[in-house]
Image (spheres, coloured by chain):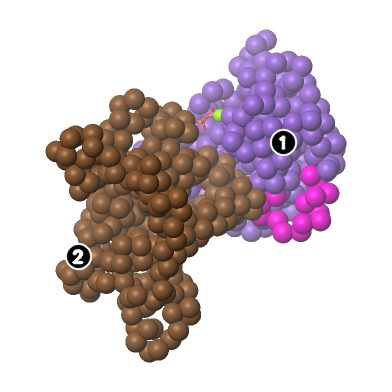
Chain colours: A purple, B brown
Amino acid sequence: MNNILDVRDLQVGYGGIQAVKGIDLCIAPGELVALIGSNGAGKTTTLKTLAGLLVPGSGQICFDGQNLHKVAAHQRVSMGIALVPEGRGVFARLSVAENLLMGAYSRCDQDEIAADLARMYVLFPRLIERKDQLAGTLSGGEQQMLAMARALMSRPRLLMLDEPSMGLAPLMVKKIFETIREVAAQGMSILLVEQNARLALQVAGRGYVMESGAVTLSGAACDLLGSDAVQRAYLGA
Amino acid sequence: MEIFLQQIINGLVQGSVYALVALGYTMVYGILGLINFAHGEVVMVGAMLALSALTALIGWDVSPLLALPLSLILAMAGCMALGYGIERVAYRPLRHAPRLAPLITAIGVSIVLQNLAMMIWGREYHAFPQLINNQPHHIGGAIINDIQIIIVIMAVMIMTGLMLVVHRTRLGRAMRAVAENQHAAQLMGVDINRVISITFMLGSALAAIAGLMVSANYGLAHYYMGFMLGLKAFTAAVLGGIGNLRGAMLGGLLLGLIESLGAGYIGDLTGGFLGSQYQDVFAFFVLIAVLVFRPSGLLGERLAERA
Ligand SMILES: Nc1ncnc2c1ncn2[C@@H]1O[C@H](COP(=O)(O)OP(=O)(O)O)[C@@H](O)[C@H]1O
Ligand SMILES: [Mg+2]
């Protein structure tokens, strides 16, 4: 089967500084892939580039066989790419329900949108209690749920999550990861960026390790979990 | 008491116009964080276009009841194109430039528009054709005429419509999302350039309506009219809290009232030393007072938030 995402020799920089120095990365349909690495490794830069918010210096991104060169960020959403950004990026001054509708902005199938909205409230019951509240009044964990639900409202075929556990209490982290597992079980292709390497590798099938802009290790998540290098660098063993 | 009521009426009429223009400033500020100082000139162009169209149509014996809405639509279309062009030419290329840069192009655009208008329409005052039999109505000793009634009713309808668009439609949701976080809005599939263009065009359509209203109310239009009107509407937007739509409407009405009550009583207050020709002073007094004592305006949040 063809990969849903194929990244070849991707290079991204900010001005003169190379933040991503030629990485290769692929995701098969239905796969949950973890991208781990310490702070400043270039994980966020990679995800933003895949979403189209940053323009790569060179390299190739193919989504579902299509070259994304020249495809604007907003067009990638209707192709099926969704990013839950670092720091969640919920619209604080829009209500929870309005945030979810923003997630469906690129769609015009009104009935299906309503059905998906109902599905999100089942997946995240917290959100229905708060649906008319401004998103800015939610707790960090609730905002993360909202950001994930909002991304799912676009009916993505590739869901990218940037540090969903950041700044959350352990109980909330557990909840978020349960949901990621659940969404993955329904066959969604997921690219999960995490600093919490252990947690990420426990839910993922495969993983990549990034260090200062380059992929230094990759392989099956269980192998990475067991590898000495990963243990030393990221798992505090 | 009669003066008081009369000045309240005048203030409400003028305030309605300020509110419509202030909305244009505040919508653009809300979405881009920049002050479109060329907006006042868009009002002027709207007034001039409407007046030219009206004069031509009346010359062709079109009935005033048809000529008025036709020229309004024409002026709105012209101003929407102008607003779109201003954003494309003067602001979009500078979107990531230091904040001073678009301010300077804004002033440049104003000067260009004023001079173009002067070349097209000349330096003289243009009289607004007498179309309808502008009936005066007496209430409690004060007078309000048909045109003033129409101005207030139209302003209320337009502002209600705008609030519905912004708060109840998919486009309005996208506008609010872009105003809050452009990157996140793009991740939702919003074409932010399109939303920004639409915002400029909406604001410019309101400016055209306001332009027609002022020139109908005063019976005059002039290539220089946009400058003072724009500055006052900007003051109104700051008074209400720039970036806040309700603030722009409230600020516009309040400024209209302050100005007209001020003009009505300044003679009494200064023992006849200053006359009503000093009414412009009030707007700038308000601007300075707001900037000193409450820079966020009446309904606004901290201004520094968007620095
Ligand atoms: N907006 C930016 N401008 C300049 N440099 C940046 C910017 N964002 C990130 N960087 C740099 O790029 C590198 C990678 O950052 P990032 O992708 O955020 O890493 P990670 O998400 O893995 O923590 C870092 O060295 C960071 O300092
Ligand atoms: Mg990061």
Q: Quadrant of ligand 2?
A: top right
Badge 2 marks a residue whose secondary structure is helix
Question: Is any part of residue A207 visible from this angle?
Answer: no
Residue B117: give x, y in percent of width and height: 24, 68
Question: Is any part of residue B10 visible from this angle?
Answer: yes
Q: Which quarter of the rendered picture does the C terminus of chain B lie within?
A: top left
The residue positioned 16% from the left and 68% from the top of the image is B123
Region rendered in magenta: A104-117
Question: In the figure, B218 relative to B58: above or below?
Answer: above
Image-based side of B289 in relation to B181, left or right: left
Image-based side of A118 in relation to B38, left or right: right
Q: Please state which amino acid type lies under the numbered disc 1.
A: Asp
Chain of the residue under the numbered disc 1 shown in the image: A
Question: Which quarter of the figure has residue A220?
Answer: top right
The residue positioned 71% from the left and 27% from the top of the image is A142
Badge 1 marks a residue whose secondary structure is loop
Residue A108 in magenta?
yes
Image-based side of B249 in relation to B184, left or right: left
Residue B144: give x, y in percent of width and height: 42, 58
Identify which residue, A226 or A18, lies in the foreground: A18
Identify which residue, A119 or B139, lies in the foreground: B139
Check the image and name the residue furthest to the left: B273
- Mark 1 sits on what residue? A132
- Mark 2 is surrounded, within 10 Å at the Cα level, by few (under 14), some (14 to 19) or many (20 or more) other residues, namely some
Q: Please state which amino acid type lies under the numbered disc 2.
A: Asn
